[in-house]
Image: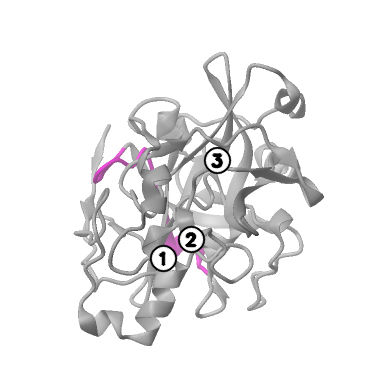
């Protein structure tokens, strides 16, 4: 059953311009938050809208890790850069249909900040996303899981299922009792356990077996809610076959930007989709860039342990 969602009016639309007031533009905190990524807020029924604000999606290194040519929102000020053409050209899919309805937005909102990332149901009650999406960079605290809302199959103000977070599992080196986020790519994954098993309703995606990465006739795709088009799920099909970097990092050239953090790196073979990794950030490399995802090898065992319980 489709859920109607109360969505705040946005200053960003597909191909549109930023329309911040002069007062907001000159506000140093506003400029800082703009660097961290502009996003939309999805409200649950009964929640009151807040003032327009932005929140953290800074990548795993506590800085703007996204290549400027792929990030018109954070880099270009009042007008979108032509470099966002790659984001605009991504294929928009019907998020109400399988397998896309197993992917959704990971939303956080408070009186001070709000932001979104992308997440994927990998079981009836577990969502895979990026660890940095669960960390409030300006305040240097981990987000309370109950304040995180996963919206499955989100599409232009509607969704297929909604559930709040209950708890989450991180890499063993991350400590939610400490104020510091461990900035290392192999640690940038998180398993968000939901209050409700909404995967029974919308389905979920399986983790790719390691040998599938090496097979021929496979496509590699990234499916996320980019900051440029936060209200629709779109596919980056320009990723190419990944190179395995240090510590099981998947290096590709996906067209991605803030908002895509936590998105699944998908393998498609014979019209079946599997999750090969979770997107972390775009890393500038001299005159080029690389997209960086965390290989499923690093979170497959923790996920299996959760499922066995």
The reply to whether discs 2 and 1 touch (Cβ–Cβ < 8 Å) is yes
Q: CA distance from mark 2 to mark 3?
A: 22 Å
- Write the residue at 30% across / 47% down: 231
In the image, residue 86 lies in the stretch drawn in magenta: no
SS class, disc 1: helix
Residue 156: percent from left, percent from top: 25, 43
Q: Quadrant of residue 182?
A: bottom right
Q: Residues within 10 Å of mark 2 (few under 14, many from 20)?
A: some
Which residue is under mark 3?
A: 264
User: Mark 3 or mark 1, which has the lower sequence index?
Assistant: 1
* Residue 7 vs residue 87, the one in the foreground: 87
Q: Using residue 202 as the reference point, say whether residue 65 is left or right of it.
A: right
Q: Using residue 47 as the reference point, say whether residue 205 is left or right of it.
A: right
Q: Residue furthest front?
A: 287
User: Mark 2 or mark 1, which has the lower sequence index?
Assistant: 2
Q: Which mark is residue 74?
A: 1
Q: Quadrant of residue 205?
A: top right
Q: Which mark is residue 68?
A: 2
The reply to whether discs 2 and 3 touch (Cβ–Cβ < 8 Å) is no
Q: Using residue 25 as the reference point, say whether residue 286 is left or right of it.
A: right
Q: Which residues are magenta?
A: 143-159
SS class, disc 2: helix
SS class, disc 3: strand
Residue 68: percent from left, percent from top: 48, 61
Which of the image's four quarters has the N terminus? top left
Q: CA distance from mark 2 to mark 1?
A: 8 Å
User: Mark 2 or mark 3, which has the lower sequence index?
Assistant: 2
């Amino acid at each position: 059953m489709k859920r109607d969602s109360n969505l705040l009016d946005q200053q960003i639309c597909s191909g549109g311009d930023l329309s911040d007031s002069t007062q907001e533009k000159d506000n140093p905190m506003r400029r800082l938050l703009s660097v961290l990524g502009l996003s939309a807020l999805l409200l649950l029924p009964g929640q009151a809208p807040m003032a327009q604000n932005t929140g953290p999606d800074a990548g795993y290194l506590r800085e703007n890790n996204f290549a400027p040519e792929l990030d018109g929102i954070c880099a270009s000020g009042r007008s979108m850069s032509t470099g966002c053409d790659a984001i605009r050209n991504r294929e928009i899919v019907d998020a109400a249909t399988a397998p896309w309805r197993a992917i959704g937005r990971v939303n956080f909102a408070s009186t001070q900040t709000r932001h979104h990332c992308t997440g994927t149901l990998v079981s009836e009650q577990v969502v895979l996303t990026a660890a940095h999406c669960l960390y409030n960079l300006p305040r240097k605290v981990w987000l309370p899981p109950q304040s995180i809302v996963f919206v499955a199959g989100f599409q232009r103000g509607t969704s297929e299922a909604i559930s709040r977070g209950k708890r989450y599992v991180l890499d063993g080196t991350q400590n939610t009792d400490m104020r510091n986020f461990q900035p290392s790519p192999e640690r940038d994954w998180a398993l968000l356990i939901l209050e409700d098993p909404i995967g029974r309703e919308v389905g979920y995606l399986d983790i790719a077996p390691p040998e599938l990465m090496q097979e021929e006739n496979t496509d590699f795709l990234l499916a996320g809610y980019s900051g440029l088009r936060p209200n629709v799920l779109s596919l980056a099909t320009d990723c190419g076959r990944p190179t395995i970097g240090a510590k099981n990092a998947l290096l590709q050239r996906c067209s991605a930007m803030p908002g895509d953090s936590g998105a699944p790196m998908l393998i498609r073979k014979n019209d079946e989709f599997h999750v090969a990794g979770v997107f972390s950030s775009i890393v500038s490399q001299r005159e080029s860039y690389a997209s960086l995802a965390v290989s499923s090898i690093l979170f497959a065992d923790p996920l299996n342990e959760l499922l066995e319980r």
